[in-house]
Amino acid sequence: MTDIREIVNEIETLRPIPPVAAKILELAEDINSSLAEIADLIIHDPSLTANVLRICNSANFGFSRKVESVHDATTLLGLNRIVKLVLLDSLSHNLSGDQQSYGLGEGELWRHAVLSAHVVKIMGANNGVPHNKHLVFTAALIKDIGKVILGRFVAFSFEKIHILVKSHGYSFNEAEKEVIGMNHEELGALIAERWRFSEKLIYIIRNHHLSDESARDDTETALVYLADLVCMMMGMSTGVDGLAYRFYSDVLNRMSLTEKDLQTVIAATGESWEKLESLLNLV
Amino acid sequence: MLDFILPSASSINSEKTEKYPFMFADTGVPAFIEALTDSGTKIENMKVVIAGGAQVLDQTGVFNIDHKNYQATKSILSAHKLAIHHEDIGGIHSRGLSLNIGSGYSLLNLAGQREIII
């Protein structure tokens, strides 16, 4: 088994989330925060300001006049889209590389992250279950951050993991835990702790495959989990782990969702495909 | 080529299914065959290659939409008297399928593991 300390030390090689992005996340999770407060944070970060303005002025948004200030940008785009842009901007570096050991080519982990964040949004909007939408968006985006580090170790142990999945009925994350001593959810949660993310965000990352039954009662974690499965099923950038994750049907009952509801989310995702592609090209 | 994601237009809660017939097996496959025959292709000259249908680990069958996609496709093809020339279905890995227009060969990519020419 790999020395866990060796894996944890690798966290330092990730580019940390800029403090301003972490702060914006915190504000977005707080229902009492205002758009102006968020704009004030952005303008104190020159590179973030430049990116928000660049994206805002891209043909995609089609505003008739040039957007010249962050305050204008926040008013025009609204809180949701601003939070989304900030997140996409500050997380893309870590997820956009090549995750060869998971069989994911250049940018595929990032692509999967953005798509599942989008699916969780559609899922939340379709089902009327009360939840914190910024939180689930962020969680969906960052849930697989552990793969960036663990991938280096999965490469050495892939044969053993593969045998457990193929012949012994393990899911991929169960096999990771058995062979390496840690799976990508646990490592992702450690990274999130190191980056001082909120307790809830750390919890969702740690439980996003719902291996711990108690997490199935948590609406936000369950939404992130279901969105991830929808992405896998739609064949979005799946690697060597493929679809080797467990589906717990009781999650649907607990959230009063039916198979038809799920298929509706899949159809809505297919419908917004073009929009998603342009979002991916922006960042 | 047709890339659909769900078995049936009637299985979702939406009025908009008519806008996206190619998203569903039961509307997409017949529309695709019709488009081909309209452009002069003869049914007997068609060579059907299907790929996909990977599934998550689900004991209950609720989430096995991809298997339902496969079943729906098979029954529509058989109703049109079309035999499947090659299929690569099921398992836990997604696939990529491309068609070389010049040669007529299909290239099947199994989750970055191997490629098969059909």
Image (tube, coloured by chain):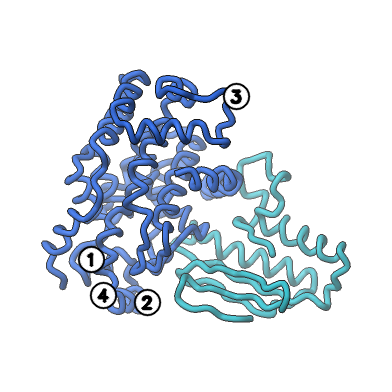
Q: Horizontal placement of B2 versus A26: left or right? A: right
- The residue type indicated by label 4 comes to Ser
Per the image, label 2 sits on a secondary structure element best described as helix
> At label 1, which amino acid type do we have?
Lys
Label at residue A64? 3
Label 3 vs 4, first from the N-terminus? 3
Going by the numbered disc 3, the residue's amino acid type is: Ser
User: Please, which chain is the residue tagged with disc 1 on?
Assistant: A
Q: Chain of mark 3?
A: A
Q: Are marks 2 and 3 on the same chain?
A: yes
Residue B95 numbered tag: none
First of labels 3, 1 by sequence position: 3
Looking at the rendered structure, the secondary structure element under dot 4 is helix
**Which chain has been coloured cyan in this picture?**
B
B59 lies above or below A11: below
Is B58 or A227 nearer to us in this picture? Answer: A227
The image quadrant of residue B5 is: bottom right
Residue A99 lies in quadrant: bottom left
The alpha-carbon separation of the residues under discs 2 and 3 comes to 55 Å
Real-space CA distance between mark 3 and mark 1, rounded to the nearest whole angstrom = 53 Å
Marks 3 and 1: same chain? Answer: yes
Viewer-proximal residue, B42 or A43? A43
Question: Along the polypeptide, which appears first: circle 4 or circle 2?
Answer: 4
| Label 3 packing within 10 angstroms: few (<14), some (14-19), many (20+) | few
Q: Position of residue A128 (x, y in %)?
A: 47, 33
Residue matched to label 2: A166
Marks 4 and 2, how far apart in space?
14 Å
Classify residue B112 as left or right of residue A212.
right
Q: Which image quarter holds the N terminus of chain A? A: bottom left
